[in-house]
Amino acid sequence: MSRLFIELYLDEDVDVLVAGLIRARGFQAITTQEAGRTGKDDEEQLAYAVSRHKTFLTHNQCILRR
């Protein structure tokens, strides 16, 4: 299988099962839990991903209140 040109860094808003699905297809993925970085804000997570040449994937949910 061809290798994805990026390696993914999934933050804690992305279900850890997604990492397993990505890996099952032969791609590289690491979660914040595996990196020991849970509880960090998105800015810190992005800086970590960039410093390790990984693409940052998040799935923040916004709740609109009226």
Image (spheres, rainbow, N blue to C red):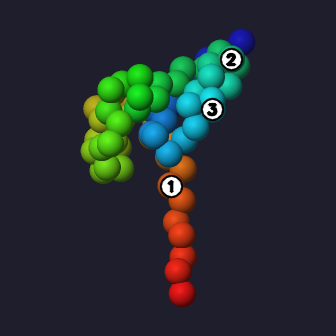
**Can residue 22 be seen by looking at this rendering?**
no
Which of the labelled discs sits on residue 24, or is there none?
A: 2
Residue on which the image places disc 3:
18
Residue on which the image places disc 1:
60
Q: How many marks?
A: 3
Q: Residue at 50% across / 31% down in the picture?
A: 8
Q: CA distance from mark 2 to mark 3?
A: 10 Å
Q: Residue at 47% across / 25% down in the picture?
A: 30
Crowdedness near tag 1: few (<14), some (14–19) or many (≥20) residues, C-alpha within 10 Å:
few
Q: CA distance from mark 1 to mark 2?
A: 24 Å
The amino acid sitting under disc 2 is Ala
On screen, 14 above or below 66?
above
Instruction: Label 3, secondary structure: give it.
Output: helix
Give whichever of discs 3 and 1 has the lower sequence position.
3
In the figure, is residue 55 to the left or right of 51? right
On screen, 3 above or below 56?
above
**Can residue 61 be seen by looking at this rendering?**
yes
Q: Residue at 32% across / 42% down in the picture?
A: 39
Q: Nearer the viewer, mark 1 or mark 2?
A: 1
Crowdedness near tag 3: few (<14), some (14–19) or many (≥20) residues, C-alpha within 10 Å:
few
- Point out the residue furthest to the front here: 65
Q: Position of residue 49 (x, y in %)?
A: 36, 35
Q: Position of residue 60 (x, y in %)?
A: 50, 55
Q: CA distance from mark 3 to mark 1?
A: 15 Å
Give whichever of discs 2 and 3 has the lower sequence position.
3
Instruction: Label 2, secondary structure: give it.
Output: helix
